[in-house]
Amino acid sequence: MKSNIIIVVIDDLIDERSPLVVKLNQEYEQVSIFNNSVEGLKFIKDNLDSKTIVILDLTLSGDDDNGHIVLEKIRANSFLIPVLIWTASDEKQEPFADFINNRAFAFIKQSRPVKDILKIVNEAAISLETDVASSLEDWLMAQPQTKDKPYMVAINGKSFTVEEMLNEIRMQSLIGKEFSYKLNKLTIDLLTRNKEKLDD
Amino acid sequence: MKWNFDVSTFKLLGRELITDKITALFELVKNCYDANADQVEVIYNNVSKIDDYSKIIIKDDGIGMSLYDIRYKWMIVGTNSKREQKISPSPYFRKVVGEKGVGRFAVEKLGSKLLIKTTQKGTSRKVCLELDWSVYERMSEDIAKNTPNKNTKLFTDIENDCWIEASDFDEQGTELIIYLSTSDQVWTELDINQAVKELSKLISPLKKSEFPFLITVKSNEFEQFKSKEITNKAIGFATEKIQLTSDLTKGTQETLIFDQGQLLVKSIELQNFGPINFELNYFNQDAKRLFKSNFKGGDIDGIKIYRDGVITTPFAESESKDVRKRDILGIDKRRYSGFFDKVSSQDLLGYIEITNQENPRIKDATNRQDFLDFPEYKALKEFIIYQIEQLEKYLTYIKDEKKSQVKTQLVTAENDIIKIERLLNQISEKSSPELKDDLKIVIKGVKGLKSSVNRGVRQFTSLQKEIVRKENIFMSLMSLQDYATELAHVVRTSLGKIIHYSEFFKTDFPNPAYEELFLEYAHSIFSEMSNLDKAIDFMLSYARSENDFETFDISSLIKKLLNVSYKHIFDKENIAVQIIANDSLNITHNKKFFEDIFENLITNSVKALAQTKDKIIKCSAIIEREKFVVYFSDNGYGIPEESKGKVFDIYYTTTNNSGGAGIGLFTVKKRIEALKGNIEIIESEFYPVGTTFKIELPFNQ
């Protein structure tokens, strides 16, 4: 069974015939390739309701933004999308502070065997599937919501529409994290007092 | 529950922050400065071979410490008492220079046991404290062997001996007695010499203080250091001496500017790094000799930064055995791209003065090897390099002036001699026979002189040419750093692809679903290998090239290539060739490189013209605004707009399928850049179809 996580590759020298993409296609339903960052970013934004993993080339050529800036732009929309930075150039010369602050998932040299790259992608996939925030995002996305009566989520006396709370979670703001934490606590509490069961 | 530390914390603080014993000594002497000392004695006793009397004593006459100070400041790790008080007490008001409060751990680097004796004025008590690091060492070994339990003694549990001795009422100062006991704590004469050298750089020669700071080094083993006073002598003998100041009230900073043969000082706005004072001394060969013979301890070793009159830590680090000096400002790095007209850090002695207050963003990095890479520090570096560049322009101008002066002088001398010869002949005609004989000898001598001078002039001219030729050869070879970077990048890119293709064979072969893919990968592996081969050839051509340089005219070469060498291809493909190349430019370079450039351009054009009806290749070589410009055009397929930025990238190719290797335009660009020239794609001469390359080459070839 192939995973339905969408792999987004932003790299100007890659196409569907590249070995990495062929191997990715063996395990993932959808691998979308973009040769420039503008189209790649648009796709990510349009697909925030799906689970995505991004493989981002550090040195997109020509006038295109470099990987540092693209990562920043992705993060302006969500902190929940794992972004794998990869590069052919010398990693020792690369500034990396912003990678940490913008929570890049991994940094990969392009010359590493496809097997290793795949392994890291799979790790990102597991992290995505089991991440509390991601699960929460899934759940919230599934809640019905209309303009007249938005589905509300309350925390600390304040009310948020599902949409607002989703954004807080995606940006990993204090409210978003607090909501996740409190919901977890509530769930664990209910479970351990046998008020609920963890079945599908 | 309370915080506590184990002994290794102690080691960590001291050893990791302070890399060698000279830096350690430096830190301790800095502390004396901060304590308003007028004089410091650094006494080396039996330091070259360890015995019971081996010790180093650092004794100052500063304000000293009280018992309170010892207990609540000295014995507290990482105290920030220095960070709060930026200025030493009245009336000295020295800007405090020992920053991180770990100087006391520097003593651990120097010896195994420390005895501090300190007293303040106005008391007859002298506080004494003994710290025995070997005890701590043994403890940490014990802890390493056994698991910690409630009886384990930690660093902060150890009691250190402390007592009071008598002192004079008016006496003040601190004495650090450091006992050496292990062989790695030994100091050789070379080490002491190095320490003396470094200590002399501690104080800026520019700062004239009301309360000067005097350091004396004494050694009981080495005659030359029996009692050596350390000073930073003012600089003499410089060929060029430049002083730039700044004015806070006016908000101005002085900077150099080379303009029409003169090196001028101009006032500009204060820069983002704050006001600085800068003294720059340049030494030519003769000046260096004079300096070295007069300042036996001195080195001409580049530019250093002083903060509040004391040297900053990145310039204080020294590798005493390894004479490598860190070129923090990057002065010598520039010389990789052409160094005949550039000065190195061995030609300059410079002092940059900053203050903690006005230049707060110039911060020493924690590892003390450099400054933190803030934009302000980058700007400071650029400012300094800019000053050096102005100096270089001036020096080059002087050199050229001298050259033409010498030549003029020689030619004038030659003309003068011809005049003398003529005059002598005139005199000879009107003279008596006896005089004629004498004059004959003189005239013969003058003739000999004339031919000597004439020879001199010709030799001078050809020597000039030879020097210029050699300089050009050197300068036009790709700089070593670029070379290494290019090679690494090229090889890694190709290798990366080959790794992935062959890995796929390994993991997925055989698989009928991928048959087409396997074929394609096999082909790609082959072409990547070929790319690698070509790339390495290209690199090697630089490694060997200096032997193949010759002087030739570019225009003639172009004409030959288009009219003769490639005629058969143009005829076969039915391509009309237009050449405009009447201006000439002689260059000294590797002819083959040039032929490669045109081979690439021609090959690309031929491919682009494959489907065109009336094929044209046009090449114009003209002189345009002091540059030699070549326009190379075809009316073929053209290059798509979005690719124009990428065509010179190393593996870009649109012609992959027709066997193009993709490395062509990359090599063209590199060759042209190595000539200090430029290549770009401009609007096609045959708009809306076709492509035009514009190549610019500067004239000083």
Image (tube, rainbow, N blue to C red):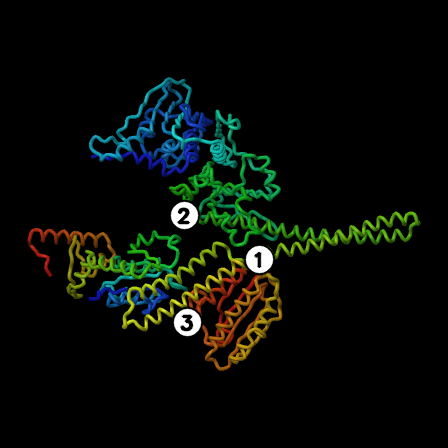
State which quarter of the image contains the C terminus of chain B.
bottom right
- Are circles 1 and 2 on residues that touch, CB within 8 Å? no
| Mark 1 neighbour class, 10 Å CA radius: few under 14, some 14 to 19, many 20 or more | many
Residue B649: % across, % down: 44, 64
Residue situated in front as seen by the camera: B79 or B424: B424
Which residue is drawn at the image coordinates 35% and 69% (left, top)?
B521
Q: Which residue is mark 2?
A: B373
Residue B224: % across, % down: 53, 28
Q: Amino acid at mark 3?
A: Asn
Separation (CA) of disc 1 from disc 2? 36 Å
Which residue is drawn at the image coordinates 35% and 22% (left, top)?
B127
User: Which of the two discs, 2 and 3, labels the residue nearer the N terminus?
Assistant: 2
Of circles 1 and 2, the one toward us is: 1
Q: Which residue is mark 3?
A: B656
Of circles 2 and 3, the one toward us is: 3
Separation (CA) of disc 3 from disc 1? 35 Å
